[in-house]
Amino acid sequence: MPRTKGDHEARRRDVSEAVWQVMATRGFAGLTLRAVAAELDATTGLLTHYFPSKRALVEYALDLLEQRTIARPRRHGGAGLAALRDALLDILPLTAEATDSNRIWVSSWDAALSDPTLSTDYARKYAQSRDRLTERVAAAQELGELPPGDPADIAVGAQAFVLGLVVQTLFDPAAFPPQRQVGLLDDYLSTLTARTDPTTITRHDPDGRP
């Protein structure tokens, strides 16, 4: 009996779920045709119909990860600084699903760094994320919630802060439960809202002396 289009789509969904489970449990480094086949309780020969090479599997996995990341529910707490806070909270591993996504993203960095095409694509994605943060920073400045300054520079710092917190949380989740992650983010945002008088800043030389 010939397979229908519905059968094919259902099988693709099964494959997608198997790819996701392998990445979530073994990290990106553990993503192999054999591992996906075992998750599906199928043969690697069946999977070559979908992925003729490891590169094809990697590209599919990254597309799947991006689709799931985009499809995740987003916070909408308001405009300006509230919107910036929401965007940063959406990045943090505050739930099991967000933890899985972040674990896969971080574990995929090694593959991206060793592949010029993937590296360029990742640079584009993080640049787009900074652009979105920049828009929210600029809106907060217009509302008077953040002091003047280059919104793009502030967005770079915010992205660097939140990604650093992601990495620390993934390595030591007991030390960074959700409540602490949120608290640290709010502490960071409070430093942005403080209007520092430049004349009060004590500058140091490269050796750390005043």
Image: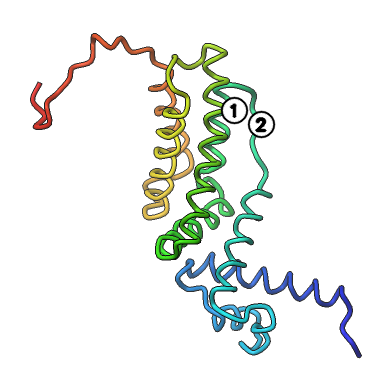
Question: Is the residue 113 above or below the residue 205 in the image?
Answer: below
Query: Do the residues under discs 1 and 2 have CB atoms within 8 angstroms?
Result: yes
Q: Quadrant of residue 162?
A: top left
Q: Going 59% across and 68% down the picture, which residue do you hit? A: 21
Which numbered marker is on residue 192?
A: none
Tell me the amino acid under the disc marked 1.
Answer: Ala
Q: How many marks?
A: 2
Q: Going 45% across and 61% down the picture, which residue do you hit? A: 116
Element on which disc 1 rests: helix
> Quadrant location of the C terminus?
top left
Residue 145 percent location from the top left of the image: 51, 15
Q: Residues within 10 Å of mark 2 (few under 14, many from 20)?
A: few
Residue 122 percent location from the top left of the image: 50, 53
Tell me the amino acid under the disc marked 2.
Answer: His
Image-based side of 42 in relation to 197, left or right: right
Along the line of sight, the residue nearer the viewer: 164 or 205 = 205
> Quadrant location of the N terminus?
bottom right
Q: Quadrant of residue 193?
A: top left
Q: Going 62% across and 67% down the picture, which residue do you hit? A: 60
Along the line of sight, the residue nearer the viewer: 142 or 127 = 127
Q: Residue at label 1?
A: 83
Image-based side of 94 in relation to 158, left or right: right
First in sequence, mark 1 or 2: give its number.
2
Q: Residue at label 2?
A: 76
Q: Quadrant of residue 198?
A: top left
Image-based side of 147 in relation to 54, left or right: left
Question: Is the residue 189 above or below the residue 131 in the image?
Answer: above
